[in-house]
Image: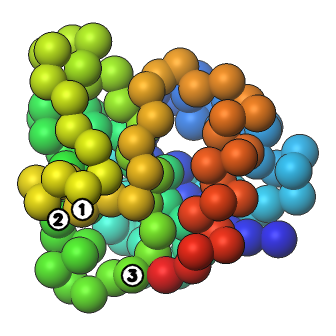
Amino acid sequence: MAKILVVDDDPDLVEDCRLILEKAGHSVASAFNVVDGMKAMQRDRPDLLILDVMMESPDDGIVMAQDLRRANVKTPILMLTSISKVTGLAYDRSSDLVPVDAFQEKPVPPKRLLALVDELLKKGG
C-alpha cells in the first residue's frame, strides 16, 4: 500500500494513527516536530503526509505545509487539527494561507481517517 508520514507532537495520536493505518496495510513513519518532519519528508518520500497544526509553535504545521509547497512538493497533505476548538479560527482547504488537501478536526474516528487517506491517495501528488 502507501507510505504515510505522521507529524504530530502528541505521541498517543501518532501511535493511534500508526495502528489504524498499518492495520489497513500502509507503512507509517513518524516525527514529533517540524524539523524531524522535514527530514523524514526528504528521507522517506511518503505518498501522504498527515500533519498537526500546533506543535512547538502554534503555526508549525501551517509553516511546514507552506515550506513544502514552496519547494514544489506535491505530496498530499491531510491536516489534523483542533485549532478551531482552541482559537475559534477555522480554515478550509481552499485557504491560501494553509496549502493542504484536506482538514480533519481531532479526534478523528478511525473510519473517517481511512476514508480521507484513501481519497487523498487516489488523487495523488
Amino acid type indicated by mark 3: Lys
Q: Is residue 29 left or right of residue 36?
A: right
Closer to the chain start, of discs 1 and 3, is 3
Q: Is residue 100 visible?
A: yes
Residue 110 screen position, x and y as percent: 73, 30
User: Tag 1, which secondary structure?
Assistant: loop
Residue at image location 34% in from the left, 22% down from the top: 82
Residue depicted at 14% across the width and 40% down the height: 59
Residue type at the position of mark 2: Gln
Secondary structure under badge 3?
loop
Q: Would you place residue 56 above or below residue 68 in this image?
A: above
- Nearest the viewer among 107 and 102 is 102
Three-letter code, disc 1: Pro
**To which residue does mark 1 refer?**
99
Q: Assign a secondary structure to mark 2.
A: helix
Q: Are marks 2 and 1 in contact (CB under 8 Å)?
A: yes
- In the image, residue 70 lies at what x, y percent? 15, 80
Q: Quadrant of residue 38?
A: bottom left
Mark closer to the chain start, 2 or 1: 2
Residue at the image point whose x is 76% and y is 33% from the top? 111
Of marks 3 and 2, which one's residue comes earlier in the chain?
2
Q: Quadrant of the N terminus?
A: bottom right
In the rendered picture of this protein, how many numbered marks are placed on residues? Answer: 3
Pointer 2: residues within 10 angstroms few (<14), some, or many (20+)?
A: some
Q: Residue at x 67, y 24 (%)?
A: 109
**Residue that carries the numbered disc 2 in the rendered image:** 66
Mark 1 touching mark 3, by CB under 8 A? no
Residue 13 in percent (x, y) is at 56, 28
Q: Which residue is mark 3?
A: 74
- Looking at the picture, how far across and down is residue 92, in whole percent? 27, 44
Quadrant hosting residue 2? bottom right
Label 2 and label 1: CA atoms lie apart by 6 Å
